[in-house]
Image (tube, coloured by chain):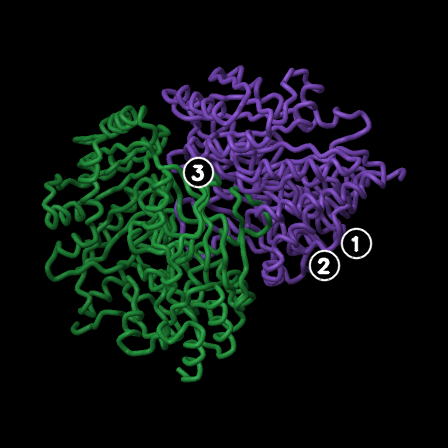
Chain colours: A purple, B green
Amino acid sequence: MDPEIISKLSSIVGSDNCKTTTAELYTYSMDASIHKSMPDAVVRPRSAQEVSEIVKLANEHKFPVIPRGGGSALCGHSVPVDGGVIIDLQRMDTIKDIRVEDLYAVCEPGVVCDDLNAALKKEGFWIPGPSSSNVANIGGMVATNSSGDKALKYGATRDYVIGLEVVLPTGEIVHAGSRTIKNSGGYQFEKFFCGMEGTLGIITEIITRVIPLPEKKAAAIAVFNELEHAGQCVSNIIAARLIPSGLELMSNVCIRAVNKALDLGLPEVEAILLIEVDGEAAVISDKIKKVSDICKESGAISVEFTDDEKRIAELWKGRKGMIPALSKLNEDYVTVMLADDMSVPVSKVPMAVKEFQMISDKYEIIVASYGHAGDGNLHTKVLMDPTRKSHWEQAEKAVNEIYDVVLKLGGTVTGEHGVAITKAPFFHKERAALIPTMKAIKRAMDPNNIMNPHKLMDWEGGFITHLRYKIERE
Amino acid sequence: MDPEIISKLSSIVGSDNCKTTTAELYTYSMDASIHKSMPDAVVRPRSAQEVSEIVKLANEHKFPVIPRGGGSALCGHSVPVDGGVIIDLQRMDTIKDIRVEDLYAVCEPGVVCDDLNAALKKEGFWIPGPSSSNVANIGGMVATNSSGDKALKYGATRDYVIGLEVVLPTGEIVHAGSRTIKNSGGYQFEKFFCGMEGTLGIITEIITRVIPLPEKKAAAIAVFNELEHAGQCVSNIIAARLIPSGLELMSNVCIRAVNKALDLGLPEVEAILLIEVDGEAAVISDKIKKVSDICKESGAISVEFTDDEKRIAELWKGRKGMIPALSKLNEDYVTVMLADDMSVPVSKVPMAVKEFQMISDKYEIIVASYGHAGDGNLHTKVLMDPTRKSHWEQAEKAVNEIYDVVLKLGGTVTGEHGVAITKAPFFHKERAALIPTMKAIKRAMDPNNIMNPHKLMDWEGGFITHLRYKIERE
């Protein structure tokens, strides 16, 4: 990169916050995805004004800018495939205002989700976050419209954002939405920007709606010999108007994996459902009892339920430890982030899991299915040896087939992780008719194509690309 | 309009569904706003395919197309200011699918909100709608991101739309979103199109999330001598984490009006709050008791509360009859839809109402304030003689001042009705920095500017324009 540009970047953010050594750049060449690519520089601004100046400079010299928060994205969102400058927003980490009586909080993009929730908890309020809430930044949550295991009852990030400050691709600082709960003022940019993955601007302030913490929780763990029974059970619970705050499915591979890694002694059946309900203390026991009854009626061979906080935490332990546990299932294989986040209508979950298993059985790799069965959002992790070329080839085929199933079932290729690079080819298949409109809007808003280029609708290649892994053998 | 175009329109929708007589066009020259302008033709298509053909014809011959549902919009959304063809979507009124176990329903745009809710009620589910739910069409609710008196707890239309079929300004039929609860797939068009007011396309199918009906309701009516006490009471209820399903404010003018029209015998104090809570039957009495206690602690001079369905309906009667009641307050004045839907942060409601009253006192007209105090969404109705030029002049000044107050308090000029013409000048003030981006997107998506032109960011004139009223004297 031109030393003159580096010098200008330094003068905007201060030399301490402009990184160019190989060691520093290496750290920023990856996120939590399979991809890797080196940036030319990393800057760490402290204000919207500084972000604006960086973006204006990028337009002047036509270099890419890639916003980055906690780096926990799973599809290569902040991997600079074409080089350029990473804008690390983690220094912008101030919670500016909490107004529970007005049901909103205002924060900078670098605030970690759990930190905002720690502050909100003092007032008895919260926002739902992703499973990675201990590292995920609010800005990144908005940019990817992330969500997690509470989405069935509580929705995704887009349902909470009521206002945004954004540095547009021109460098202009604009405000969308407001501090009011309602707003029907024209184009809903504060919603549109959820999921734009840094391609239309850089979020520098978020106004998020906050909601009251539930008084009490209860959980049930239901064991099924047949996957279909577990699936029917999920539909029955929802149709009975008992909307759980969490409804997780573990398939057989996952059960074996957590048993091996965590010694939980779960029955190694076809499917286990972990169901959590929350609400007023006076009704919680009755609610979880109703859920348990439905589980039994739907064919569960055993159901345990409790409203004891400690026992609930234990029940969640297996689910929370899933990803590391999967990597320990087979000593030669590791968990690879592929096809990790498809969503289907809730009633289609058992069919999807069955078909994923059939696909997996055809190949040398292992596909483990688990996920938020209550909202139809499934995670599959591919277990493979990422140093082997043949495993990548098989994974590529399996993932293609998996997404075909998802689209056939009326689903979407991404429920909560986003598109970026890893899901781009499948996203193009799902959204073919809308891609030209996305590109037209991108061109209209970012004529120099500087904002996180070659992502989402603009990624043209395959998904086994720019790998962080070194392939060493066939 | 060129007879050749009329003939082509007729061949698309059938001659029975292509209207061109003056009497027919007159019916479509107005919606529920103050505006009026004659269309050149009205067509009533039955399918997305027919809509697409009409839009393609519009591009070929460069005439405006204006989508219209129930005609209940309050800001001139479907008034064809520049002539053109109104596309009446009321024949597309099929509820295509209801899948409560998957938490969604699919319907055509012409389905009336109450009709969808009648069908959902059989399964124990519903969606929240606007006060005009007996006439409002789902398509129009999406196009204006409408909401109503349940939004504090249940949100606006944008929070429910998970998928859309849209005829783009090019005539192409596209799908946004999906049948899944979660979706983080790139630009959220299904949310962005909420509030686009027919300027970016015509909605031909809606997939809406549905939610369980609450088991039981309870309501309280709290009487305050001081508006500030009522305002503080609202904040106290929310901060105590009791999120009511309805929280309505009536100011003094409104109380007098409903007393006069409906003989309800309400105390003619400064402010009355009507508070409704809902939820599980087992906790509802306790909940409304807590609300009532907070009302008393906040300075209410009397509080009545009940969980009797019949009594709750009586309590709502005054609020529901507000608009016709206001027209009867002063025999020479009628209710005019001006400045009718601003939203401020909840805690700013008393200050806003006070300032609106001070503005009103300066002029010969009357400004009546009421509204959804719980979500900060206020309605003011201007009471005036619309045949008098001087009243319009005074109303114009008052409305300008009112919106300045709203923006000063960090509010938005529209909470639930939209912008179209009546709010355009104030919307331009509120969103000045984003207007160029809105225009750029509009140009990119609708290069011939055929889709409901001159509305929203593209309305350049004042708001006292294209009046449906005849001004007869000074």
Query: Callout 3 environment at 10 Å: few (<14), some (14 to 19), or many (20+)?
Result: many
Q: Name the mark nearer the viewer: 3 or 1.
A: 3
C-beta proximity under 8 Å, tags 1 and 2? yes
Amino acid residing under circle 2: His
Q: What kind of element bears circle 2?
A: helix
Of labels 2 and 3, earlier in sequence is: 2
- Res A60 visible: yes
Q: Are marks 3 and 1 on the same chain?
A: yes
Task: Tally the numbered discs.
Answer: 3
- Residue at (24% x, 49% y) in the render: B369
Image location of residue A69, percent across then percent down: 64, 40
**Spatial separation of the CA atoms under disc 3 and disc 1:** 43 Å
Q: Chain of mark 1?
A: A
Image location of residue A369, percent across then percent down: 65, 33
Q: What kind of element bears circle 1?
A: loop
Q: Chain of mark 2?
A: A
Image-quadrant location for residue A90: top right
Which residue was labeled with disc 2? A61
Q: Quadrant of the C terminus of chain A?
A: top right
Question: In the figure, A203 relative to A129: above or below?
Answer: below
Residue at the far right in the pictured view: A473
- Res A50 visible: no
User: Which sits in the foreground, A273 or B136?
Assistant: A273
Image location of residue A147, percent across then percent down: 56, 37
Which residue was labeled with disc 3? A104
Of labels 3 and 1, earlier in sequence is: 1
Give me the disc on residue A2. Answer: 1
Residue at the far bottom in the pictured view: B3
C-beta proximity under 8 Å, tags 2 and 3? no
Q: Is residue B37 left or right of residue A438?
A: left
- Residue at (63% x, 32% y) in the render: A370
